[in-house]
Image (cartoon, rainbow, N blue to C red):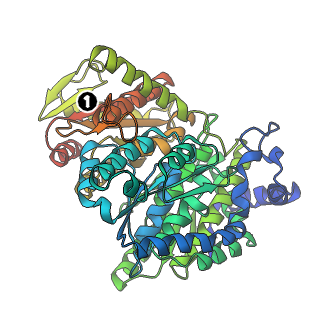
Amino acid sequence: MSPIKIRLHRGERAVADALRELRSKRIVERIWAQDHTVWKPDPGEISNRLGWLDSPQSMLEAVPRIEAFAQRARQDGLKQALLLGMGGSSLAPEVFRHTFGVRQGFLDLSVLDSVDPAAVLECAARHDPSATLYIVSSKSGGTVETSSLFKYFYNQALKILGRKAAARRFAAITDRGSGLEDVARSLGFREIFLNDPNIGGRFSALSYFGLVPAGLIGLDLRRLLKRARAARDDSSAAWLGAAMGELAAAGRDKLTLMASPGVASFGAWAEQLIAESTGKEGTGILPVNGEKLDLLGSLGDDRLFACLHLKGTPEEEIEFEAQMAVLAASRQPCIRIDLNDHYDLGGEFFRWEMATALAGWRLGINPFDQPDVESAKKLARRMVDEYRQIGRFPEPACILQQDGIELYGHSTARSLDEGLLSFLERTGEESRPRSYVALQAYLKPSAECTQALQALRHRIRDRCKVATTVGYGPRFLHSTGQLHKGDAGNGLFIQFTAAMPEDAPIPDDPGSEGSSLTFGVLKTAQALGDERALREVGRRVIRFHLTGSLVPGLNRLTEALK
């Protein structure tokens, strides 16, 4: 098991007290006994969400089936795999692909968790149905993004291959009795993997949802699960969970995730786990993923740092240790985990799951439900219905338009600069302690767009001295969306939407030519629905609609913060 080093400075006594309470109340033992009263007296959405505790052992029996599935796909000449999923269904596979790459002779895995029409069309152009295995991954089987993507790619395959061959290009991962299981059986999918229904999506990395994609790219699944089993017997999760929960309760509720380049993608998986599990009932731990530390003065007293280190190139080592030096000089509380190799991530998946469950105990919340996620979904559905009735979205009037950017949600601004600056000034309101700024990008994901968003977030952080986050929509709705609406309300939300010159129809049914909705309409409805959901719970939101090129538009806003 990877060693963990905890340096908490003034927080050490409080965390030591939390550990003593944890031990005196036998919290870990009671979790292993699946005692729901650790969190709440009502067993609802707790007793049926603890199957992840057994995954490192129970999934060993499934390894031969997964390996045989991957072997048959290779023998049939398939070269690529495209996973269609959101949140817990897509994040762990993405970690495996970015961390391990593709073993020679195995399938090259891509993950599509965007309904941006340009992203969908681009992905379709890169994947030849005759050589692609499509993995439709959804616990509930009814996730709107996943079902829309499935219908689109199924129809693409159907046109080229015919019904029988198209069905052989698809496999499903879902819970027993879901609508996806029914569809997969009726169409004759190549394989259907039915997951343990007692595992929630964000705790599913070591179940079929993570292991089937991992097997397709050639991971040694037994080795991965062996590391996870070692974590089950390790006590360090208690230290990690106690530190997360106790320091968050004391005000250090911005858990800043740092990682070596070789394991950098782990942060996005941990982000969903922590945010969706703890962000509710007016509390929460905000995961801050992807920040680069370069200014001591930008760090407030609301941070706890968690740093995953995997030995890399000399240049990577120098940069990582330099960031560690910044933390040491600032006397920020820090948890450092040194990984021996990539397979230690098996242990980290389990350690962070247990630690998050323990942090939930300390915060007094149920870490396994997501009570505020549905609000944005309902409003998005309402937006779609209104669009179908009147042919446009019921959105507020544009306040101003300048330099190819429209501003919404700020009634007194006379320029883009004034709108952005006056909005960000509210981070310093005394009635809003420990604020953070979340950039919500309903934009086409790309390396260039991500770089521009990162530049903007760092400019905001350095100017306002607050933590910042970045998320692509609608993906972030399945990760940090719960926390945005369920925490103490200290977030400021800057939403970005954009013109979509390309669009693609969503088939009403697999194999049907009819379409009453497009990806562009769905994405816009989700953005506007999320904006309205945030406002309805008293959150502060501003929206910039980019009518021109994305990167220049984002750079224009960054320049406003000089």
Count numbered badges in the picture.
1
- Residue 105 in the image: x percent, y percent? 39, 80
Identify residue for label 1: 419
Q: Is residue 154 above or below residue 169?
A: above
Q: Give the residue drawn at x 37%, y 55%.
A: 166
- Which residue occupies the foreground of this view, 220 or 366? 220
- Residue 136 as seen in the image, left or right of residue 503: right
Across and down, in percent, residue 451 comes to 26, 56
Q: Is residue 323 visible?
A: no
In terms of depth relative to the viewer, which is nearer, 32 or 108?
108
Q: Residue furthest left?
A: 403
**Quadrant, the N terminus:** bottom right
Q: Name the residue rendered at 63%, 43% in the picture.
A: 177
Q: Residue at x 56, y 33 (%)?
A: 372
Judge whether 402 appears above or below 367 on screen: above
Residue that appears at 63% across and 69% down: 6
